[in-house]
Image (tube, coloured by chain):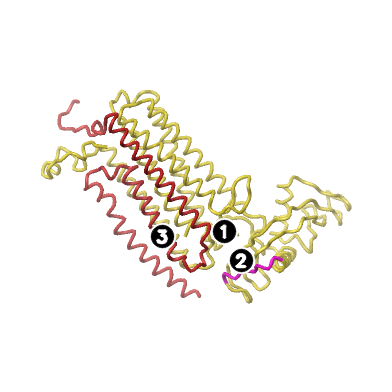
Amino acid sequence: MAGHASKEIDSKTLWGGKVSPFSTSYGKLMMWFFLVSDALTFSGLLIAYGFTRHAFQGSWPIGEETFNSLPFLGHGYPLIYVALMTFILIVSSVTMVLAVEAGHRMDRKGVTKWMIATVIGGFFFVGSQAWEWSHFIHGSEFGKVELADGSQAIVKGHWGDVKNFTVTVDGDHHEKGDVITMKEEDIQHTYRHAVADGHLHEGMITLHDGSVARVNKAVNHDMILIVKEAGGKYKQGQKIEDHKEAAKMYEEVVNAGDAGRVIYGANLEQNEYGPQQYGQFFFFITGFHGFHVFSGVVFNLIILLGVLRGLYHRRGHYEMIEKTGLYWHFVDLVWVFVFTFFYLV
Amino acid sequence: MLRDDIVEYSLDGHHSEEAGKKIRKKIWMVTGILTLITAIEVAIGATVHQDSDYWTTVKIFFIILTLVKAAYIVLVFMHLGDERKILKWVVLIPYFIFALYLIAILLYEGLAVLESNS
């Protein structure tokens, strides 16, 4: 881009009033100033995150252990999903800069085409983030367990599905001998709630209506326990990699009938991945960024409407595309840092 | 234009079809670089574990790659590289001062808290 900025002007004229010493229009300069302040907000958040991460060190979750799932495909794909999200955002940044370039040639069709592509890319990113949040809040099938010695461990392995419950003690709704079947999701949900609340004891689940039932469940395979917080016996970072031993220890906790020893998923108070602050930072930083992406999509849509109405063409220049483009690239820029500091290191 | 003391900077952004071709070529080149860097980051992140001996080196490598990516986005996509020098520094200097200072503080204080807790 050539423009006024590349013109050779002596500093006396530049700073003598009447012209902008920055050689930009008022709007563009103000967008830059806004971005400088917004970037400082994000720096503050990431620096607070870095401080907390260093203060916790070993018990802090590891990105490739926490984020290793893909929609429809399950586990075992470390970081692929976030990489995909990063790629989507980079591509939509590219289509944006192509829209700006088309604008400089007064190519209305080109601007329209690339702006539509940018908006679609933005929606894809917001959608991916929604999936990621839902997955993060929902958590794994195993959850995090508090072992007998008081240490806390995360669990990896292959989950055996819960099939059904066979009632052994009558309740308000179910009679002895009933076999309760539900949709896979619902039965899993019921099972998790029972475990978290301590209603599962020696393979027997106490249901809401007071009936007691035997849980028919496939066996868990290939289990590994990774100790995140030390207890009386196990040290931080220690791995129990003997599958049988790990499975035994896990079953013991799950079937103990104690409330609060297994934590599933995440909320602002606790999460299965690591310290409380981890969940809070996840929600705040990716949430704040996601809010920026969402508002960016809205801005882009408004500008797209202007392009479609021919507003900027009549004005004689497409600088509005440049301004909203600055904001959009900034969103991409922030994600580059979030990606590195939240997911990679 | 009603007032003759207003310079219309917006119109200066225009360029010809030929210049556009060159700019587009550069954009696609930068796209390739950014994608490649992300792919490298993910490949390393998925293979090297945090308890490995190389982790510190990998971490520094990640941060360098991130800064390279950020530089391409800011200088090429946001066109800051084509702006006047004064604007470049007004935007960038706050980070060189505050961010570096705060990062030094966070490392020092964070590790001190870790030590006092263990």
Amino acid type indicated by mark 2? Ile
Based on the displayed image, in which of its 4 quarters is residue B22 positioned? top left
Q: Residue at x 33, y 37 (%)?
A: A323
Label 1 sits on residue: A65
Pointer 1 or 2: first along the chain: 1
Give SS at disc 2.
Answer: strand
Camera-side mark, 3 or 1: 3
Query: Marks 3 and 2, how far apart in space?
Result: 27 Å
Residues at circles 1 and 2 in contact by the CB criterion of under 8 Å: yes
Residue occupied by mark 2 = A226
In the image, farthest residue toward the right: A177
- The colour chain A appears in is yellow
User: Residue under mark 1: which chain is it in?
Assistant: A
Where in the figure is residue A101, as x and y percent of width and height?
Answer: 33, 34
Which residue carries the number 3 mark?
B61
Q: Main secondary structure of the magenta part?
A: loop
| x, y percent for residue A55 | 47, 68
In the rendered structure, which segment of residues is drawn in magenta? A236-243
Residue A176 horizontal/vertical position (percent)? 88, 53
* Marks 3 and 1 in Cβ contact (< 8 Å): no
Q: Nearer the viewer, residue A170 or A9?
A: A9
Q: Identify the subunit bearing mark 3.
A: B
